[in-house]
Image (tube, rainbow, N blue to C red):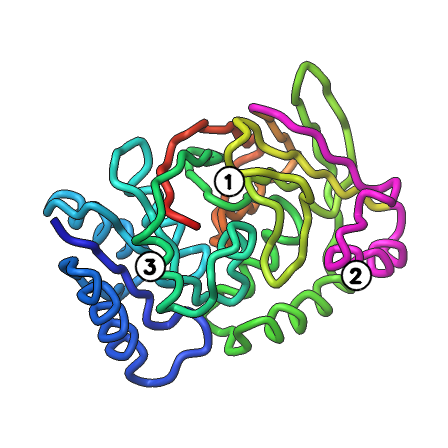
Amino acid sequence: MSIAVIINPVAGRTRPGAARVRGELAAAAIEKYGEIPDILVTERPGHARLLAAAAVQRGARLVMAWGGDGTINEVASALAFGEVPLAIIPAGSGNGLARELKVDRRPELAIMDAMRANPQPMDLGEIGGRLFVNLAGIGLDACMASQFNDAKNHHRGFSGYLRLASRLLLTYSSQQYVIDAANTRRDVRAVVVVVANSAQYGNGARIAPGARVNDGELDLVVVEESSRFVTICQTPRLFTGSLGGIPQYSIRRVRDVTIKSREPMIFHVDGEPFEGGTELTARVRSDALRICVR
């Protein structure tokens, strides 16, 4: 049996040769514990899912995803509802899930901790037929994901997010939604509607403080808009964990939710944007994944 390491060579701010350096580091760390490494490098979007599925077929006992939330999503989607657990080596722009799970940002220690850990059950979310590990969103954050992942965007990392967020906060138009959850219907004009399995987008921006990946529920967050000036002024609360103190913000725990809009919705799962219809349904998939973290 082997330990597969799936490396996204462009995750984070990498230099030429990053895949080789990461692969050699991972192999050395795994061999130190007498295990057999299976080092795999992604070549395109969606490739991590295929590599993870193939690694399971070859008998991997553990699959490590070295990248950001998008890479983790692909690997987790391949491992979901199976027995082979996931481990995380964070290397993305935000690392939202890794931060919440307190995964060490030093690759050697993240690998060591994962190999020593006992697999634990973890929930997944599902929206529009797509699984997510961290969170899914509709509105401003989905628009940001779409533009951030555009091939024409050359500003990566946290500074790239800030640059994009500053521009969209001035130009984005909030939308009208009908939200059905827990036998309650709301008609709201919102900046974002988020369905969270974990608490933060990444880089400490906590949209759903208190969200847990093993509670059998998702956290439904709605940020309504009274004025753009108020929205801009309240944005720093994402980083102080104090969004709950403003009347435009609401959060509730749900097992499923349906969101409707007059126009087709762009949504994102773990930062990857997709085009949806005028209705999206999200639900929790309890204990759908096994994860190795300390």
Q: CA distance from mark 2 to mark 1?
A: 29 Å
Q: Residue at x 27, y 74 (%)?
A: 25
Of mark 3 and mark 2, the one earlier in the sequence is: 3
How many numbered marks does the figure carry? 3
Q: Which residues are magenta?
A: 226-255
Determine contact: label 3, label 2, CB under 8 Å.
no
* Image mark for residue 221: none
Residue named by callout 2: 236
* SS assignment at label 3: loop
Outermost residue to the top = 183
* Image mark for residue 276: 1
Of mark 3 and mark 1, the one earlier in the sequence is: 3
Q: CA distance from mark 3 to mark 1?
A: 19 Å
15 sits to left or right of 197: left
Instruction: Report which quarter residue 9 is drawn in.
Output: bottom left
Q: Is residue 241 magenta?
A: yes
Please, what is the three-letter code of the amino acid marked with disc 3?
Pro
* SS assignment at label 2: helix
- Mark 3 crowdedness (10 Å alpha carbons): few <14, some 14-19, many ≥20: few
Of mark 2 and mark 1, the one earlier in the sequence is: 2
